[in-house]
Amino acid sequence: MAEVVYPPVIVALKTFWKYLGLQFHFEGDSNIPRKGGAILAMNHIGYLDFALIGTAALPTGRLVRFMAKKEIFDNKLAGPLMRGMHHINVDRNNGSASFVAALRALRSGEVVGIFPEGTISTSFEIKELKSGAVRLAMGSGAPVIPTIVWGSQRIWTKGVKRDLRRNRTPIYVTFGEPLVFEKGSDVDAGEKLLRETLLQLLHQVQANYPDSHVGQRWAPARLGGTAPAPLN
């Protein structure tokens, strides 16, 4: 498909990251296939997660088609950009249409990004997952790449005023080893495996993060931070 909108948006984002002074640490992009469909199953801790993960995937030569809520597509400014980048509109009142659109994209060889938690985790832990990523994998035959982002919650997250100062915030993105879910296999078991994998990967990223989590509003209580306790 023609890419008219995505390239200039990438340039704008790179300029924005440079302005913020973000310190990137990206790992595991070799786990993203260079051809064919793939699903990035991502944790969700801030409003910039999709843009940061998309940036981390750029060395693969793949452009990620993110599944995003309908409200973003309805925005007068963001909507045309989202459609121009061929992202996938998720209408919670008509979930089957977005599932079919994502399945079609995967079968045509696209990389689809999905937040299986469904919404931002204000505890910054992994919430219970919805089954969409696993069901898409079963329906398309595409591998699931567990994906963790950490640090984005320090810039802009739910319930906290965004901080757009230049402050050299470390941003970590790690792509884990692919998971394959065969058609007809147990969806609940697949969902459990995906969540356990995301948890393990999250803990690894947090252990390697250069800044202390103790006493920070952007860190979970498990690490000594002051973020709200998990709701589940």
Image (cartoon, rainbow, N blue to C red):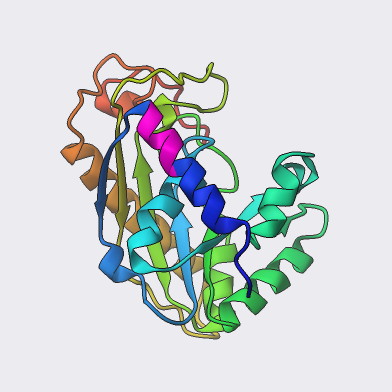
Q: Main secondary structure of the magenta part?
A: helix
Q: Left of 189 or right of it: where is 110?
A: right
Depicted 80 relative to depicted 28: above or below: above
Q: Residue at x 50, y 36 (%)?
A: 121
Q: Residue at x 59, y 82 (%)?
A: 108
Horizontal and vertical percent for residue 4? 63, 62
Q: Toward the viewer: 126 or 80? A: 80
Q: Is residue 115 visible?
A: no
Quadrant of image for the N terminus: bottom right
Q: Residue at x 56, y 27 (%)?
A: 158
Q: Toward the viewer: 173 or 197? A: 173
Horizontal and vertical percent for residue 172? 29, 42
Query: Which quadrant of the structure image shows residue 59?
Result: bottom left
Depicted 184 relative to depicted 157: above or below: below
State which region is magenta: 14-19
Q: Left of 179 or right of it: where is 63?
A: right
Depicted 168 relative to depicted 74: above or below: above
Q: Left of 130 or right of it: where is 218?
A: left
Total marks drawn?
A: 0
81 is within the stretch colored magenta: no
Q: Toward the viewer: 144 or 200? A: 144
Q: Residue at x 28, y 52 (%)?
A: 201
Horizontal and vertical percent for residue 18? 36, 34
Q: Is residue 34 visible?
A: yes
Horizontal and vertical percent for residue 137? 52, 75
